[in-house]
Amino acid sequence: MPLLVFQLQAPLSAWGDTAVGEYRPSHDYPGISTLVGLLGAALGLRREDEAAHAALRDAYGYAVGLQSSGKLLRDYHTAQVPSQASLKKRPHASRRDELAIPRHDLNTILSTRDYRQDAGFLVAVQAGDDSPYSLATLGDALRKPRFVLYLGRKACPPGAPLHPQLIEAVTAEQAFDSYLARLTEAIAKLDGSTHVASHELPLPVERIAWGKGIAVGLAPDLTVTRKDRPLRRTGWQFGDRSEHLALIRKEA
């Protein structure tokens, strides 16, 4: 069974979690909304193309291998927001609409945003029967994306090539192992050596998180509910979904 595997590495990343008010937290690892948005940007899909994004959401299965969730970085900055009175009876479907009012009706608030430092992940994608794009097409798009890719926020570009690879494997766990072996070989070729120093080796996968539509080969240690299933990207509406997590227990 073919799986598409690629890496997400960056000095800074932000994986949107449920946000209330001025606080914008980050999850430890990317969810389905992030992955759908990333593939959509690579393919050149417009945000308002709801049907195309829904197909990426429903026609593929996704698994995330956590190599390192990184360290928390909390950023404080100011933001302008309109008063509730100024928005009364005024349509405001976007941030631009909110700010299209007289400046004296804008208030300044302190906003808090969380980032993850030096985090690293692998992503496996399995195509369903009704998938609109082949895995090879998705891989080509990640190599030469139509739109600029970023890891959660525009201030978080990838710190390394995504290096998408098609891998024949029965489960996502096996695909991650094969991918890391290929990546180690690629690093050795770049160095012109058959030996890779330990500090240059890619980190092993410690945990795997996955939803429906992909074979992982592990029994879940935990099942959680995440509110990251994109319903309408133009209106930033998300629904609940079940996600499984399992620790990787390698024999010594």
Image (tube, rainbow, N blue to C red):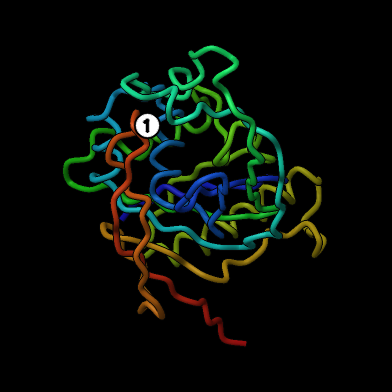
Residue appearing at x 45%, y 28% in the figure: 41
Residue holding disc 1: 137
Q: Nearer the viewer, residue 61 or 47?
A: 47
Amino acid on which disc 1 is placed: Thr
Q: Residue furthest front?
A: 85
Q: Which residue is pictured at 35% across the width and 79% down the height?
A: 219
Q: Quadrant of residue 174?
A: bottom left
Q: Which residue lies at the image location 55% right of the left edge and 29% below the top edge?
A: 81
| Residue 182 horizontal/vertical position (percent) | 59, 53
Total labels: the figure holds: 1
Q: Say whether residue 47 is left or right of residue 149.
A: left
| Residue depicted at x 31% and y 21% | 89
Q: Quadrant of the N terminus?
A: bottom left
Q: Residues within 10 Å of mark 1 (few under 14, many from 20)?
A: few
Q: Secondary structure at mark 1?
A: helix
Identify whether 6 is placed above or below 98.
below
Q: Nearer the viewer, residue 101 or 23?
A: 101
Q: From the viewer's perspective, is 18 left or right of 51?
A: right
Which residue occupies the extreme left position in the image?
Answer: 130
Relative horizontal placement of residue 161, taking residue 52 as reference (left or right): right
Question: Quadrant location of the C terminus?
Answer: bottom right
161 or 18, nearer to the observer: 18
Give how far across and how far down residue 179 sits, in percent: 54, 56
Instruction: From the viewer's perspective, tell me whether residue 104 is left or right of residue 59.
Output: right
Q: Would you place residue 224 above or below residue 163 in this image? A: below
